[in-house]
Image (cartoon, helix red, strand yellow):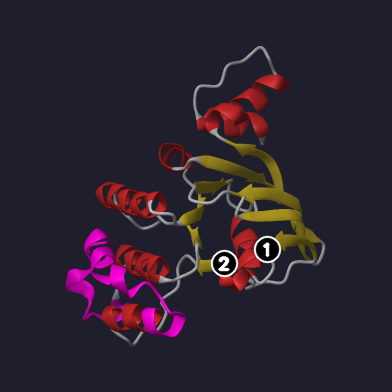
Amino acid sequence: MLLEVRELSKRFGAIAALSDVSFRVREGEVLGLIGPNGAGKTTLLECLAGVLPSDSGSVTPRGIGKHLFYVPDGIAPWPSQPVGWALDFTIGFFGGRGELRQQIIDQLDLGKLLRQSVGTLSKGQRKRALLAIGLLSPQPVLLIDEPFDGLDLRQAREIATALRWHAERGRTLFLSIHQIGDAGRFCDRFVLLSNGRVCGEGTVAELASLAAARDASKTYGNLEEVFLALT
């Protein structure tokens, strides 16, 4: 167990965005956080990353900034600076993985974008640049909000291959993914989130067993069926 979240809660006025959320992150795994829009996925990542303060609960180990690096969705950091500058700044400021710079550029097909300003990138290009920044960071756990958003099918497969390459070399990935089919093809285990609550945690087989225990009259062949049964 690399990271343990216990009974994490967050409210916005009368709205309970997260309610007693608990789960574990294992070293070197690709853990998928899945749920519908409004389930609380981004709020959970922001609480883990320290962007938002949680109202209650705990994350072990303490000092999570040393362990986690968060890649939000839909931002354009340092918009007036070129992509190459952003990568080099990440390495220098955060003490990042400079030895992987060229490898990551090649994996994410960023070679032609290095001199282009971050603020002028398309949605898919910006996503690849953000992922490169995350992969260059030194923290062992990488939190990524919607890693495949804005990518076409070919790009999404290439990104999945790159992320898996890093996971196989010890990087732990916790990914918020809206498309359940994408999550089912890529992740090792899953945290199911609905209305701010965890409805299940485990592999597809483990979650299918949980669903079957609730309704033995049905069989569950894929993650989508399991998710609908548990949420």
Q: Which mark is residue 47?
A: none
Task: Look at mark 2 in the image and give the residue it sits on.
Answer: 67
Looking at the image, which is closer to me, 183 or 202? 202
- Image quadrant assignment for residue 194: top right
Q: Is residue 150 above or below residue 190?
A: below
Residue 112 within the segment the image draws in magenta: yes
* Residue at 45 percent of width and 80 percent of height: 94
Residue 158: percent from the left, percent from the top? 27, 51
In 3D space, how far apart are the residues under numbered discs 2 and 1 (Cα atoms)?
A: 8 Å
- Image quadrant assignment for residue 90: bottom left
Looking at the image, which is closer to me, 152 or 143? 143
Residue 162: percent from the left, percent from the top? 32, 54
Q: Residues within 10 Å of mark 1 (few under 14, many from 20)?
A: few
* Residue at 66 percent of width and 32 percent of height: 230
Residue 74 can be seen in this image: yes
Residue 189: percent from the left, percent from the top? 54, 40
* Residue at 30 percent of width and 84 percent of height: 85
Q: Given the image, on which type of amino acid does mark 1 rest? A: Pro
Looking at the image, which is closer to me, 57 or 221? 57
Residue 117: percent from the left, percent from the top? 28, 82
Q: Given the image, on which type of amino acid does mark 2 rest? A: His
Q: Quadrant of the C terminus?
A: top right
Label 2 element class: loop
Q: Are marks 2 and 1 in contact (CB under 8 Å)?
A: yes
Task: Look at mark 1 in the image and give the residue it sits on.
Answer: 61
Magenta residues, start to end: 91-120
Label 1 element class: loop
